[in-house]
Amino acid sequence: MQKIIRVTTVPISLGKLLQGQLKFMSQYYDVIGISSKGGGVLDQVSKQEEVRVIPIEMTRKITPFQDLKAVYTLYKIFKKEKPHIVHSHTPKAGTLSMLAAKLAGVSHRLHTIAGLPLLEATGAKRILLDIVEKATYACATKIYPNSLGLHQIIIKNKYTSPQKLKVIANGSSNGIDTSFFDPDLYSESDNLKLSSSLGITSSDKVIVYVGRLVKDKGIEELIKAFRKISDIRDDVKLLLVGTYEKDLDPLSAETEKEINTNPNIVLVGWQDDVRPYFAISDVLAFPSYREGFPNVVMQAASMGLASIVTDINGCNEIVTDGINGKIIPVKNTEALFKSIKMIIEDDVLRNAMAINARESITSRYERQFLWKELLKEYSSLDN
């Protein structure tokens, strides 16, 4: 059986973002997962996916000495394991493993792009990140942008030749298990119990955000827009499901203060299962600056929620404006405020979008479909 090594910077990406995919592929290939230890998370991934794992310390920041050490360690592993394919996800893992795989003579070096953090960088940092990105693509034999928009951005920035690029299926890195993200799994009594525990009444309209609480997810704009909503209505709640990343992309002190003091903002932190929070909500607000192909928007839509998203790649492929949600300009607080206000006030529009939302996912992004398309891609490399 031929061997595939999948590499991510942190183990949560192997276990959550690619959930089920490694186990599926292990029916056809000998699959090994490589990532950082993550306090035992990698061992949990091994049990969950039923594959062998190898811990390699990698950082998400620019750390030259640690990065060189990781490249050498990966090189030794690839030489020993002799994989047919090395397939990486996440920026740092891509750079390190594509370089190591090329040095080790691995035939098929594949890298999936799920967003470009460098797009928000400027000056010397942007120049450095551009160089690193081009080097990663140069070392890879195939690049898989996980959205059509990202495909175009890569070509526009001339990071690699179009011949190296391919979007698998309709986009996304792992699709959605629509039998898992199904609103019918949650009864009215389930929803009422959770809502009550959070201080949300049956007459409240609930806007939900799921993700990291950082600037480049549009949280500054979301909090400003919601403050304007709070000034005119007291029956709207903002439900924040996620944690801060104060070391990488901190919010302003003013925004944090508003989150902590506004009685209509409910912060529940990190949740292993986000479905109950979608089930008690009326609309997803996801005003991100950049994405690859956001799982949160697919999850919310599969749970029957209309979404307000920014006009960026991935988001503007999942959402069709006026059909299953609203698309607004990036970093535009006023447009976000107006869209939230319109959707919470127009029950007919919101309900119609909600019905369309789930169908838009089941027809295009079912997880098993994407896995089979990726398997076809792997098989084509054999030939």
Image (cartoon, helix red, strand yellow):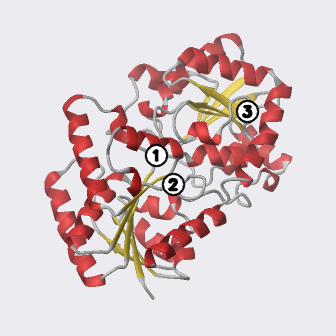
Numbered disc in front, either 3 or 2: 2
Mark 3 vs 2, N-terminal side:
2
Three-letter amino acid code at disc 3?
Answer: Ile
Number of residues whose C-alpha sits closer than 10 Å to that of mark 2, classed few (under 14), some (14–19) or many (20 or more): many
Dots 3, 1 in contact, CB < 8 A: no
Q: Name the residue carrying label 1.
A: 151
Secondary structure of the residue carrying numbered label 3: loop
Q: Residue at x 16, y 64 (%)?
A: 69
Quick one: quadrant of the N terminus? bottom left
From the viewer's perspective, is 94 left or right of 338?
left
Question: Which residue extends farthest top?
Answer: 232
Question: Which residue extends farthest left?
Answer: 65
Dots 1, 2 in contact, CB < 8 A: yes
Q: Nearer the viewer, residue 242 or 92?
A: 92
Q: Name the residue carrying label 2.
A: 167
Q: Nearer the viewer, residue 195 or 125?
A: 125
Expressed as whole percent of the image width and height from the top left, the position of residue 216 reads 43, 33
